[in-house]
Image (cartoon, rainbow, N blue to C red):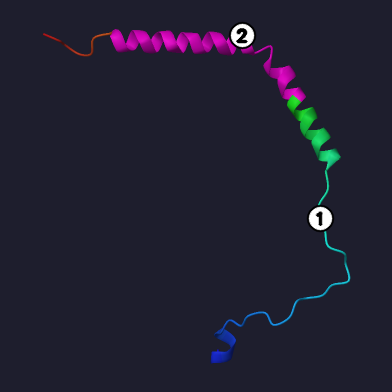
Amino acid sequence: MSQEQSEVHPVKKALRTVTPPYYGHSDREMNTIGAGIFLGLLVLLIPLLPFLIIAWVISKLTDEVATRAPIGDEE
């Protein structure tokens, strides 16, 4: 490689294109799909909520019992 190829040169003029600039827009189709997935998960998880609460309560109770239980031989 020569010295000229390894140097970084600043841009001297702006690139002009024939396409208009893109400013973005709302994507209603993807928003609808996301809302559908959210509602589907909600419908699946609402019936499981009581079981999740029971499992959480049992884990908290066992943690409390485990902290109060003696560890090893205490003399």
Any mark on residue 32, and which?
A: none
Quarter of the rendering containing residue 26: top right
- Amino acid type assigned to the residue bearing label 2 in the image: Pro
Coordinates of residue 56 in the picture (x, y in percent): 50, 13
Are circles 2 and 1 on residues that touch, CB within 8 Å?
no
Quarter of the rendering containing residue 15: bottom right
x 68%, y 18%: residue: 45
Any mark on residue 23, and which?
A: 1
Whether residue 42 is visible to the viewer of this picture, yes or no, is yes
Q: Name the secondary structure under disc 2.
A: helix
Any mark on residue 50, and which?
A: 2
- Residue placed most toward the observer, 63 or 32: 32
Coordinates of residue 58 in the picture (x, y in percent): 47, 8
First-in-chain label (2 vs 1): 1
Above or below, 16 against 28 in this view is below
Instruction: Locate the C terminus by quadrant.
Output: top left
Q: Is residue 8 left or right of residue 45?
A: left
Above or below, 62 against 22 in this view is above
x 83%, y 33%: residue: 32
Question: Which tag is nearer the camera, tag 2 or tag 1?
Answer: 1
Write the start and end of the magenta stretch as one range: 39-68
Coordinates of residue 55 in the picture (x, y in percent): 52, 11
Q: How crowded is mark 1: few (under 14 residues within 10 Å), some or many (20 or more)?
A: few
- Amino acid type assigned to the residue bearing label 1 in the image: Tyr
In the rendered image, the residue lying farthest to the left is 75
Residue 22 falls within the magenta-colored stretch: no
Coordinates of residue 3 in the picture (x, y in percent): 54, 91
Whether residue 2 is visible to the viewer of this picture, yes or no, is no
- Give the main secondary structure, helix, strand or loop, of the magenta stretch: helix
Q: In this view, does 16 lie to the left or right of 67?
A: right
